[in-house]
Amino acid sequence: MEHQKAMNRRYFFLAMVPIVLAVILALLPDKSDTLDAERIAKHLKSVKYTGVSPDKLLLEAVKNDRFMTSDDLAKIIMGQDPSYLLIDLRDTTEFEKFSLPGSINIPAKDILSDTKRDIYYSDAYTYVLISNGTVLSEKVWSILRRAGYKNLKVLDGGLNQFYQLYLNPPKPGELDPSEAVDNYHFRKAVGAYLGLPNPDEFIPGGSAAVKNTSATTANAPVKTATKTVVTPVKAAGGGDEGC
Amino acid sequence: MGPLIPEYISPEWNNVVAIVLGIAFGYVMESAGFSSSRKLVGVFYGYDFAVLRVFFTAAITASLGLLFMDYFGWVDMAALDGLPARVYPIIVGGIIMGLGFVIGGFCPGTCVTAIGIGKLDGYVFFGGIMLGVFVFSEMFPLLEGFYNSGNVGDVSVPEYFNINPYWFTAVVALVAVIAFYVTLQIRKKVKKVQY
């Protein structure tokens, strides 16, 4: 009889466990801030954690391996590597003014919208995030990493540095190693491939003259010098229509 | 291993994990006495309610566990796939399954457990399942219309009736405990069966 009572008590406690756990679960605070329609339909009150956790994201942010240099990107563009998808994060108006060949435009504010997400929802690609600088693309990188996307790269220095590098590649000095000379020629070739005007071809004195004019203070002779610079540009532009 | 810890156990291990889990499942079923058809059909005659208790407990444990793990962010419940609920075929299938259960004394899982300990009726039951599967497959073009009727999609009960899944689980847990108590009282009144 005593044994029976003890068993009954044990059954009672075991039976109470699921009820108590279920009530605790029902009373837990609502943490949902997700916009996922499926989770809202299921009335789930938890945050969706599919991406990397905040502490791991911090570790990744300290490492710099997410950056892609302009030269690497140029090689990908010229080689037309199909495993890379270039995502231009700027506004549509800016994108229409100029963009890198092969890049697609997803403005940063639309990056998590459902219709746009289908475009880059694949592990097969490596995604290169592109904006004018790095601030916007870094922001989007951290958002996408938290949302669980992999294979993301950020264009180091952004489009500004990219164009700066190929519009006016820094000339190697006489004491620089041969790689610097190779790099210089490669960058000039990229500039030609992208259809960027080459200062050496149409400005008397080449890119060095452009640097000189910007370096000198504004006085009368310089004004005439800039005038002489402007007219050949127009002429070159007219003859350069094939580009 | 599924959605739980994909970054530590890669999907290549899925089959290995499945075999280990399957062996553990079979072991627990056999230890609980589920390889005995007399124990299993006890739920229909009122002398043993182990089946009802085990399945009700399993359902509550699974739903509580999933909801808790979803809350802590270990499992994404929205990403879990369920089979679409086809209402009318489920009713007919449930009747056939229940008849098979009470006549044959096994359900598809427990008959394999019975084979594990060498029971002849387990082999016969398993042969019957295979025969049924074969006949159904051959007849499928005739049954296809009915098979797909009453499809309401992949929905859970709280989703379909638009109620809070947390309180729903609490109510199910309460109902389960009441069922345990009621079946205990029934068992006390029914004559004891030795098996």
Image: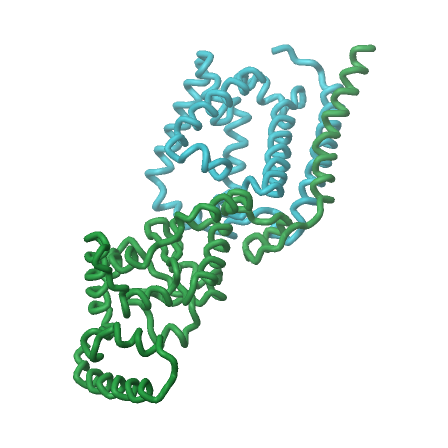
Residue A97 % position (x, y): 35, 77
Compare residues B103 and B62 and report the one nearer the observer. Answer: B62
**Chain letter for the part of the structure drawn in green:** A
Question: Looking at the rendering, in which quadrant would you find the C terminus of chain A?
Answer: bottom left
Image colouring: by chain
Residue B66 % position (x, y): 59, 38
Tell me where residue B20 sits by quadrant.
top left
Indicate left or right for A194 with A92 as reference.
left
Tell me where residue A161 sits by quadrant.
bottom left
Compare residues A86 and A182 and report the one nearer the observer. Answer: A182
Residue A126 % position (x, y): 34, 52
Question: Looking at the rendering, in which quadrant would you find the N terminus of chain A?
Answer: top right
Q: Residue at x 37, y 72 (%)?
A: A95
Q: Residue at x 81, y 15 (%)?
A: A5
Compare residues B163 and A102 and report the one nearer the observer. Answer: A102
The vertical placement of B94 against A210, above or below, is above
Tell me where residue A129 sits by quadrant.
bottom left
- Colour of the chain lettered B: cyan
Indicate left or right for A12 with B9 as reference.
right
Q: Residue at x 37, y 58 (%)?
A: A155
